Image (cartoon, rainbow, N blue to C red):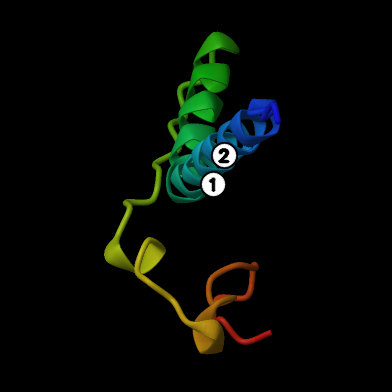
Amino acid sequence: MIKNSNGQSLVEYLIIVALVAIGSLSIMKVLGHTVNVRFANITESLQGHESKINPETVNSEMYKKRGLNDFFQGAGNDSSGQH
């Protein structure tokens, strides 16, 4: 009997791609606002404006471990975290 290992390698590659995607999304969640502010400052400079937008600092609340009871806290525009 001949074993076909192509399916097994495909599953392994899919798991690696999924882990990289999850890591990238979590990094962008933490640093996304800062990157947006940097691009906004570049755009303002290219347009000749003198204004500068200050980014928020990344604090431990942005990347702490969460459970189901506070999963959506800070996800929306509501500053209280209640949805």
- Residue at mark 1 to residue at mark 2: CA–CA distance: 4 Å
Split into 4 quadrants, where in the image is the C terminus? bottom right
Q: Quadrant of residue 43?
A: top right
Q: Residue furthest left?
A: 60
The percent coordinates of residue 42 (x first, y second) are 50, 18
- In this view, the residue in front, 30 or 11, is 11
Q: Which mark is residue 22?
A: 1
Q: Is residue 34 left or right of residue 68?
A: left
| Marks 1 and 2 in Cβ contact (< 8 Å) | yes
Q: Secondary structure at mark 1?
A: helix
What kind of residue is marked 1? Ile
Left or right placement of residue 69 versus residue 34 in this view = right
Quarter of the image for the N terminus: give it. top right
Q: Residue at x 29, y 60 (%)?
A: 59
- Seen at 55% across and 77% down, the residue is 71
Residue 57 percent across, percent down from the top left: 32, 51
Element assignment for label 2? helix
Residue assigned mark 2: 21
- The mark total stands at 2
* Above or below, 44 relative to 65: above
